[in-house]
C-alpha cells in the first residue's frame, strides 16, 4: 500500500497522483495494489464529504483522478485477475433524467471493488432495465436520478421489474441528489444510497 498515493488523491493533487501511479507501475508495484490504494483514497474522500469538509466538486475531481489512474493501471492487470469477475450489478439513470455524475462515480467505485458493472447510461426506460436483468442476471440493480420527476420513473421501473417476474431475484437501490428514505419507500426499492460508498456497502452486503 502506498500511503503517499492515497494521501495525494485524498488531498486533490491531480497531476501528482497520476504521475505517482505511473511511477509505482514502472517500479513493479502490483496493479491491484494501486487500485486498492485508489479505493482507500475514495473512502477518505467519501468520509470528508459526509463530514462537510468536501463538497460535490471534490467528489467529482476525486472520481476523475481515480478514473485516470484506473485507465493507466487496468491494462497491466494479469489476465487471470481480469477474468475473475465478481457479482453483477446493473446501473442506470432512469427515464426522463440525464444526470450522470453521481452514477458514474458509483459505477467506478463498484468496479474497483470487484463488481461486474453494466452501466445502461442515462434516460433509461423501465423495459431496458428489465431486458438487461433478463440477459445478465444481476444480484443488484441501481436506479439513479437527480430530478424530482425521476421518482416516478424509479417507481415505474421497479413495477416493471416486478411485472416481469424479476423482483425476487434482485436487490434494488436508488440514489441521487434528492433521493431519501421516502423516495425509496415510494419506489418500493430495497434501500437508498446517499453516496457512492454507501452504494458499495449495500452491494457488498447483498452479495455476501
Image: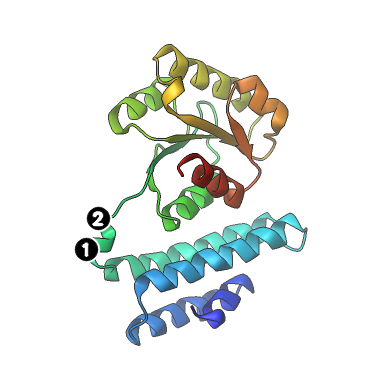
Q: Position of residue 41 (x, y in %)?
A: 57, 68
Could you say whether the residue bearing mark 2 is in a helix, strand or loop? Answer: loop
Find residue 199 and report its image quarter.
top right
Q: Is residue 165 left or right of 194 when viewed as pictured?
A: left
Q: Residue furthest bottom?
A: 27
Where disc 1 sits, the SS reads helix
110 to 79, vertically: above or below: above
Specify few, some or many for label 2: CA neighbours under 10 Å numbering under 14, 14-19, or 20 or more.
Answer: few
Q: What residue sits right under mark 2 in the picture?
A: 83
Q: Quadrant of residue 21?
A: bottom left
For mark 1, does the 10 Å Cα neighbourhood hold few (<14), some (14 to 19), or many (20 or more) residues?
Answer: few
Residue drawn at (51%, 64%) of the image:
39
Q: Is residue 4 left or right of residue 127?
A: right
Q: Is residue 94 visible?
A: yes
Give the residue at mark 1.
79
User: In the displayed structure, does residue 79 sit left or right of residue 185?
Assistant: left
Foreground pick, 199 / 108: 199
Amino acid at each position: 500500500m502506498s500511503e503517499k498515493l492515497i494521501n495525494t488523491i485524498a488531498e486533490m493533487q491531480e497531476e501528482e497522483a497520476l504521475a505517482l501511479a505511473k511511477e509505482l507501475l514502472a517500479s513493479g508495484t502490483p496493479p491491484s495494489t494501486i487500485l486498492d490504494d485508489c479505493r482507500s483514497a475514495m473512502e477518505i474522500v467519501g468520509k470528508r464529504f459526509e463530514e462537510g469538509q468536501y463538497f460535490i466538486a471534490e467528489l467529482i475531481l476525486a472520481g476523475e483522478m481515480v478514473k485516470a489512474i484506473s485507465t493507466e493501471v487496468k491494462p497491466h492487470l494479469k489476465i487471470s485477475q481480469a477474468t475473475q469477475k465478481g457479482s453483477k450489478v446493473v446501473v442506470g439513470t432512469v427515464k426522463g433524467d440525464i444526470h450522470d455524475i453521481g452514477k458514474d462515480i458509483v459505477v467506478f467505485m463498484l468496479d474497483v471493488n470487484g463488481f461486474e458493472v453494466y452501466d445502461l447510461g442515462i434516460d433509461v426506460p423501465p423495459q431496458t432495465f428489465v431486458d438487461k436483468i433478463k440477459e445478465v442476471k444481476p444480484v443488484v440493480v441501481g436506479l439513479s436520478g437527480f430530478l424530482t420527476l425521476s421518482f416516478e420513473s424509479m417507481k415505474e421501473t421497479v413495477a416493471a421489474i416486478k411485472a416481469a417476474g424479476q423482483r425476487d431475484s434482485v436487490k434494488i437501490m436508488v440514489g441521487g441528489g434528492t433521493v431519501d428514505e421516502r423516495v425509496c419507500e415510494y419506489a418500493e426499492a430495497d434501500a437508498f444510497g446517499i453516496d457512492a460508498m454507501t452504494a458499495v456497502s449495500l452491494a457488498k452486503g447483498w452479495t455476501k
